[in-house]
Image (tube, helix red, strand yellow):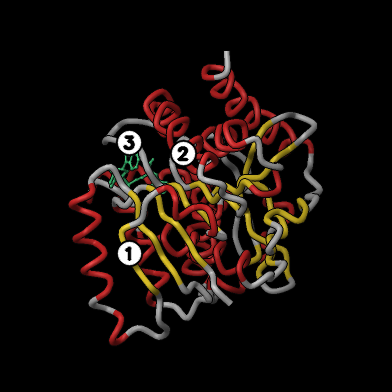
Amino acid sequence: MNHKVIIIGCGNVGMSYAYALLNQRTSVTELALIDLDEKRVEGEVMDLNHCLAFAPSHIDIKVGNYEDCRDAQIVVIAAGANQAPGETRMDLIYKNSKIFKTIVTSVIDNGFKGIFLVATNPLDVMTYLTWKYSNFDASRVIGSGTSLDTARLKYLVGAKVGVNPKNVHAYVVGEHGDSEFVPWSNANIGLQNIKTFLKDEELVEICEEVKNAAYEIINRKGATYYGIGMCLVKITNAILGDENTILTVSNYDSHNDVFMGTPAIINSDGVKRRIYIELNEEETKKLQHSMEMIKGAINEIIK
Ligand code: NAD
């Protein structure tokens, strides 16, 4: 079966995703790259094609244009300005919302009928705008959400306790940003509640480390991209493989008219449904606060 993916925005994030796709045995058969910097995309395509001799499966990789979106299954958007040191994800909002209007309109005008996967920050706002500008059913618009934050959490807990991150069953929820949090009341290692392994102070420390991870990386190397590249591949596989995999993506909350990171079941229809998390009083307040942060930012744009 032909599985075509379009990447719009071929900077650090777009290309880390492309490289991760190529290194894993995915069902993607065609990859088209679009960026304002056409010369750079030509170079990226050449470089990726030179991997094929040693790649686990074949992918047709080419410089794309918006007409390629017509028969694509997934359009991944990683275009836009990046966080400068000291800048929050929300600071990017004005620059990136303008870029998104042009991009999403061009994708739709060319007859795209697949699923949008958004990586650009501020993530939840950009996902909401993609939904608004596309007029798609909300199930077909997915943001990477707190999938990266969740991956960071699993790594940090795993390292602290000495277990494989895959056996840490804990999620970061809310905004992909400063108001995100971990509902520890729902966090397990194996089948045991996490509080039997770690003290409250340690949980607070881990949560802060997750939240500040992007800032710490950006201070050292200017940008973060490998982690999000892997998350985007994981979401791509869940969609193309019709996997019904639970991932903390940014998905639509119709009661509050907001996109936000919560665990959701992902398959070939996009977001099949959200998973309900039973939160305690403090966690409910945190989720409410996070939602209000995102809504405030959305209202800045949709006035
Ligand atoms: P980058 O500057 O390396 O790449 C951005 C690319 O977008 C550039 O190549 C630029 O030419 C292109 N671009 C800009 N306007 C465009 C347009 N109208 N059409 C097509 N291409 C356009 O930035 P990056 O490091 O790849 O980061 C991209 C975005 O991803 C940023 O918003 C960043 O904050 C975000 N990000 C998200 C996560 C996450 O967890 N979701 C993680 C890391 C970074």
187 vs 233, nearest the viewer: 233
Disc 3 within 8 angstroms of ligand 1 (CB): yes
* Amino acid type shown at disc 3: Ala
Answer with the quarter of the image where residue 254 lies.
Answer: top right
The residue depicted at 45 percent of the width and 28 percent of the height is: 97
* Element on which disc 3 rests: loop
Work out how far the residue at label 1 is from the one at label 2, CA to CA, in angstroms. Answer: 19 Å
Work out how far the residue at label 3 is from the one at label 2, CA to CA, in angstroms. Answer: 19 Å
Instruction: Tell me, yes or no, if residue 213 can be seen here.
Output: no
For disc 2, the neighbor class at 10 Å (few under 14, some 14 to 19, many from 20) is: some
The residue depicted at 63 percent of the width and 54 percent of the height is: 248
Work out how far the residue at label 3 is from the one at label 1, CA to CA, in angstroms. Answer: 24 Å
User: Compared with residue 300, is residue 253 higher up or lower down, i.e. above or below?
Assistant: below
User: Compared with residue 66, is residue 231 higher up or lower down, i.e. above or below?
Assistant: below
* Amino acid type shown at disc 1: Lys
If you read the primary sequence from the N terminus, does the residue marked by circle 3 or circle 1 appear first? 1
* Element on which disc 2 rests: helix
User: Compared with residue 284, is residue 293 higher up or lower down, i.e. above or below?
Assistant: above
Circle on res. 81 = 3
Q: Which of marks 3 and 2 is in front?
A: 2
Q: Name the residue under label 2.
A: 106
For disc 3, the neighbor class at 10 Å (few under 14, some 14 to 19, many from 20) is: some
Answer with the quarter of the image where residue 16 lies.
Answer: bottom left
* Amino acid type shown at disc 2: Ser
Answer with the quarter of the image where residue 191 lies.
Answer: bottom right
